[in-house]
Image (cartoon, grey):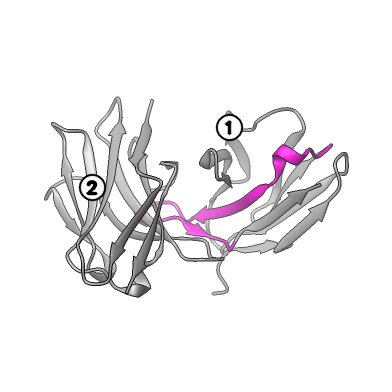
Amino acid sequence: AQSVTQLGSHVSVSEGALVLLRCNYSSSVPPYLFWYVQYPNQGLQLLLKYTTGATLVKGINGFEAEFKKSETSFHLTKPSAHMSDAAEYFCAVSPGGYNKLIFGAGTRLAVHP
Amino acid sequence: DAGVIQSPRHEVTEMGQEVTLRCKPISGHNSLFWYRQTMMRGLELLIYFNNNVPIDDSGMPEDRFSAKMPNASFSTLKIQPSEPRDSAVYFCASHPGGVEEKLFFGSGTQLSVL
């Protein structure tokens, strides 16, 4: 079975500061891992994904995430936060494939001037 | 393409009433998913269909919930009778199959049961 734990339901950073959103997963098979972003009153959009190969993956809007098997983690980072990054971020896992996803509870990111 | 279309956008109803949420997936997509989002439980997968057939409904909370997909272009999620604890945002998502790397989400239905 697969599950996802996101540490911190709310994260607040200053504009220009580092963004770090934490995600740990559990999977009985090699996982596919995803980060999705949800802007207010919208559906979720794919930010980035890891399937196989390079463990550091880059996504849209300057975000990246690193798959660490030994730590069962897939933390999301961005070197410099922008006001437009304020949104809710969801980490997700699947046992393979891009469709049946198990999501974490989400982390709401606030960016203040 | 218009994307995944959900209706209504908002629904307010009274406890005990029947509620029907609707979803039109992207044309050509063969998988459809219903998710529920609440503050307490986050985003939960309720049920998913592949080629109009329900594959996994283990996330459906109880018998008050039912979902159908009569054809490739339409799905419904019904709650009868509704209860205040059903208040949530319900998302529909579709996937074309194959190597497409992402789910396509609708904008959701905000359900409030009073």
The answer, for residue A102, to whether it is visible in the render is yes
Residue B84: where, in percent of width, then height? Answer: 76, 40
Q: Residue at x 30, y 25 (%)?
A: A28
In the rendered structure, find residue A110 and report the number of the disc placed on it. none
Foreground mark, 1 or 2, reads 2
Q: Which kind of residue does numbered mark 1 sit on?
A: Gly
Residue B65 horizontal side relative to residue A99, left or right = right
Residue B9: where, in percent of width, then height? Answer: 70, 64
For mark 2, does the 10 Å Cα neighbourhood hold few (<14), some (14 to 19), or many (20 or more) residues? some
User: From the viewer's perspective, is residue B55 above or below residue A108?
Assistant: above
- The quarter of the picture where the N terminus of chain A appears is top left
Q: Residue at x 29, y 62 (%)?
A: A13
Q: Quadrant of residue A8?
A: top left
Please report the bounds of the magenta region as a residue range: B80-107
Please check the rendered image and state whether residue B86 is part of the magenta-colored stretch, yes or no. yes
Q: Are marks 1 and 2 on the same chain?
A: no
- The quarter of the picture where the C terminus of chain A appears is bottom left
Q: Which kind of residue does numbered mark 2 sit on?
A: His
Helix, strand or loop under label 1: loop
The reply to whether callout 1 and callout 2 are in contact (CB within 8 Å) is: no
Residue B114: where, in percent of width, then height? Answer: 81, 47
User: From the viewer's perspective, is residue A69 above or below residue A45?
Assistant: above
Counting the numbered discs, the total is 2
Task: Identify the residue under disc 1.
Answer: B59
In the rendered structure, find residue A75 and report the number of the disc placed on it. 2
Helix, strand or loop under label 2: strand
Q: Between residues A104 and B69, which one lies in front from this camera angle?
A: A104
Residue B99: where, in percent of width, then height? Answer: 34, 54
Cα–Cα gap, marks 1 and 2: 26 Å
Q: Residue at x 25, y 63 (%)?
A: A59
Q: Residue at x 62, y 39 (%)?
A: B53
